Image (cartoon, helix red, strand yellow):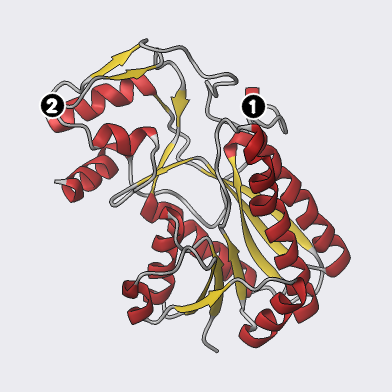
Amino acid sequence: MKQKALVTGGTGFIGTNLLLRLLKEGWDVFCLVRSQFRLSSEFLSQGVKEVVCPNSTEEYVSVLKLINPSVVFHLASLFIGQHKTCQVSDLIESNVHFGTKLLEAMSCAGVKRIVNTGTSWQHFNNEDYNPVCLYAATKQAFEDILKFYVHSENFQSITLEIFDTYGPNDFRPKILPTLLNLKKDDPEILLSPGEQKLDFVYIDDVIECFVLSGLELSSKKNAQGDFKKFCVRTGNPIKLKELVEMIEKLKDFKLPVKLGGRAYRPREVMEAYPFGNNPPYWLPKIGLTEGLKKTIHRII
């Protein structure tokens, strides 16, 4: 039978790439979206079915029963690195409440396979659990709720802890796309001293991990609950200041940045989390130099 996917967060950088890959692989793809963030015509014309988020949990149940997906890919989240008091409700709504309604609806509809998205920021100071920020704490909170459904309702789940991702058409205001889009005559950007280590995974490798995880879940026939968590990383972190030098060589000009121009952020992550395991069925294929060249070529 044709695989059927329900994707949340399909309008984000990782989500849009996942939609395209699932379509390419022959999946029947549904995307759950908020009314203010609709899919572009590009995705609709290629066969993605858009489903606007309902209001009540009961309506979510009806949606899940109607679609009956083989696997749910849950990527939707609100990322705020340093939150303000007025943003607390939004973080809880997006990262805990919405996902919990989805899990309850899945349970009622008999849909019990989910690929969830975590973050390496759940491991400040390389601890098993120490959230860097409130965003990371909400990701852990949802993960704990997911464990309840695994144990009580026999869900089959894989949580993928995402490290740093990058690639062409990355519209996020993150450090790597910011550096890659800089021009010689742009105003100078102030950076930290740059000793923090970052593990960058090219978007194609990230998407490959999501798809393989979905296939891993859909191949399971038993009814026993299963909670697995894996890291999505290369294992080859690089210091920010070394990344700047690498990009300067590839672009053949000195970037308008000043290392040490500002202090590190509170609870700055200085080391890429070295513990935990990558999925046994996945290996990254694209190294940083190759990935940067692919990305720069698309920018030019």
Task: Report the front residue among 73 and 79.
Answer: 79
Task: Report the front residue among 180 and 208.
Answer: 180
Question: Which one is in front in this view, the residue at disc 2 or the one at disc 1?
Answer: 2
Residue 141 percent across, percent down from the top left? 75, 46
Q: Is residue 279 above or below residue 277?
A: below
Residue 292 percent across, percent down from the top left? 26, 40
Task: Report the front residue among 35 and 277.
Answer: 35
The image quarter containing residue 201 is top left
**In the drawing, what numbered circle is on residue 168?**
none
Amino acid beneath label 2: Lys
Would you name the residue on which mark 1 appears? 124
Would you name the residue on which mark 2 appears? 184
Which residue lies most toward the right here? 152
How packed mark 1 is, by other alpha carbons closer than 10 Å (few <14, some 14-19, many 20 or more), is many
Mark earlier in primary sequence (2, 1): 1
Which residue lies most toward the front here? 86
**Which residue lies at the image location 48% right of the left edge and 35% below the top edge?**
235
Q: Is residue 269 left or right of residue 300?
A: right
The image quarter containing residue 198 is top left
**Which residue lies at the image location 68% right of the left edge and 73% below the top edge?**
220
Residue 155 percent across, percent down from the top left? 77, 67
**Which residue lies at the image location 57% right of the left edge and 53% below the top edge?**
280
Residue 143 percent across, percent down from the top left? 73, 50
